[in-house]
Image: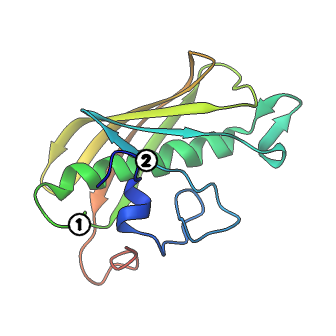
Amino acid sequence: MTAAQSLQDRYAPHNRCFGCGPANDKGLRIKSIVAGDEVVADWSPEEHHEAFPGVMNGGIIGALLDCHSNWTAAHHLQGEAASPPCTVTADFHVKLRRPTPMGPVRLRARVAEAEGDRCVIEATLEAGGKVCATCRGTFVAVKEGHPAYHRW
């Protein structure tokens, strides 16, 4: 993977997920990049992502943190394999710590715990150098027969 290539573009170019699918023209289309022991993404909202004047919608913030954390888990669980396993969200808890201004945000995520086919991921969403939201969630690799098994 090149330094600038996202996990989504490399492993799931036809994925239509609202949050992270490169093939969803109406989605958020985040680009998660491995940066040392964390995974980062820069993203900018559009006017229709606004909750009220100048502030990003909390549901959009949750979707960003969910998908970015999911890809962080998939990357970790990939290990030495040629591609990551398909992973899904088992649970995630978002704390909106302050209003998130409309404008560029940075997502950061890292593995807090990992065991077998699951990871607990801790993530933040920052704007203007301040943490506006945090997330902690569990993400699980799915087995054949699960509807998400072949999504990338």
Q: Badge 2, how many Cα within 10 Å: few under 14, some, many 20+?
A: many
The C terminus lies in quadrant: bottom left
Task: Find disc 2 in the rendering and name its residue.
Answer: 32
- Disc 2 and disc 1 in contact, CB within 8 angstroms: no
Q: Position of residue 99 (x, y in %)?
A: 71, 22
Residue for badge 1: 83
Residue that appears at 63% across and 18% down = 128
- Check the image and report above or below for 24 versus 138: below
Query: Does residue 31 appear left or right of residue 3 in this picture?
Result: right
Q: In percent of the image, x 65 and y 61: which residue is there?
A: 27
Question: Image check: 78 left or right of 142?
Answer: left
Question: At label 2, which amino acid type do we have?
Answer: Ser
Q: Give how far across and how far down residue 3 sits, in percent.
A: 34, 45
Amino acid type, callout 1: Ser
Q: Quadrant of the N terminus?
A: bottom left
The tag on residue 39 is: none
